[in-house]
Amino acid sequence: MADVNLGQLASTTLKNYQKSLKDNIFKKHVLLDHLKSSGGTKMFDGGRSLVAPLMYGTNDTVMKFSGTDVLDNTYQEGIDASEWDWKYYNVSIVITKTDESKNRGKNAIINLLKAKIKQAENSLSETLNEDLMTGSDAKGLVGLDSIIGTTSTVGSISGSTNSWWRSTVDSTAEVLTFADMRTVKNACRNGAGGSRPSLILCSQNMYEKMFALVTAMYGFNPGPKSQEGKRLADASFEVLEFEGVPVSYDEAIADGTIYMINKENYKLGILDGWDMKAINKPEPSNQHVTIKDIVFGGAAYTDRRASLGKLTAKTIS
């Protein structure tokens, strides 16, 4: 039997799997899937950091006029930018010479490579999702738990100093009601540039509480009616709907917590060339191993913090 060029075979297998790998990483978790499928991701060429222009005021020169009335040309403040550091992730696929000897033949090695690629895919997706929810590590994506806040500083802007850089947060310890959710949801759409949340994410216990409230109200779960709610349900996610907004849960979210996001104002920025890019590495001189890396670079960011909402400390009874 002819020797198999392990490095070349690994490169070819990974190259052929590249698109599926990208798709699968985003399809594994509801937030990643929602952002990818609904315009919530944006590609960037690079730069020292991700700079997101934002609007926090109104243009006071709007006026009614007739004939030769003098128009108001007053210069308007109220446009600034938030700044978000790029975050980088790497997962390695390592095949040893002894792996090769234990999996003789091209097909056996390809199966081993596919299994290791799947393992890497699952691990990278899990880490990205966890960081998108609760990330606070300086090297990782800023999590929703930090982005959705009031007086804290995110995007290099202080919510304490700037009242327009504050989300609506309900942290009252109490049994969850739809009235609580409605208040936060409506607040997200108030003000210039406000809009209704595109997705409500919550812990499993909050999802089950909402399910109980819905079934008590209707006697059954009516299921999602919005286009995005139906799409998520078809993608095998558990989905309810609250006043036209899809609701789903994620195990990375702490009990009693609900996030409300809007894909127009909350996005995942992705660096060009870092979108689950496969990187070939030379074999190390002191080891019999073949190494292939998959890298991701990006930043989770918002350009209107007031369009995001959060409920915490809610209970089921």
Image: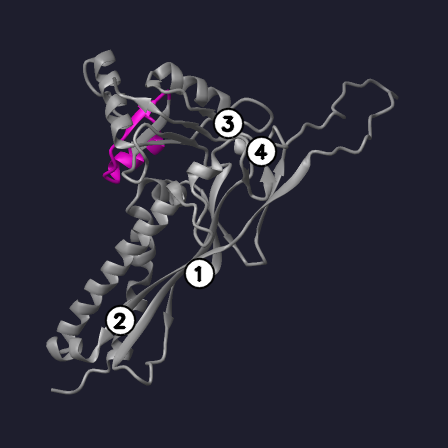
Q: Which numbered disc, 1 or 4, marks the residue that appears first in the sequence?
A: 4
In 3D space, how far apart are the residues under numbered discs 1 and 4 (Cα atoms)? 31 Å
Amino acid type shown at disc 3: Ser
In 3D space, how far apart are the residues under numbered discs 2 and 3 (Cα atoms)? 46 Å
The residue shown at (39%, 17%) is: 180
Q: In this view, does 111 lie to the left or right of 286?
A: left
In this figure, what is the number of numbered marks?
Answer: 4
Is 226 magenta? The answer is: yes
Would you name the residue on which mark 3 appears?
195
Amino acid type shown at disc 2: Val
Query: Element at badge 3?
Result: loop
Residue situated in front as seen by the camera: 87 or 19: 87
The residue shown at (28%, 47%) is: 28
Would you name the residue on which mark 4 appears?
159
Instruction: Point out which mark residue 94 bears.
Output: 2
Amino acid type shown at disc 1: Trp
In 3D space, how far apart are the residues under numbered discs 1 and 3 (Cα atoms)? 31 Å
Query: Element at badge 2?
Result: strand
If the image is split into quadrants, where does the N terminus sit? bottom left
Picture quadrant where residue 197 is located = top left
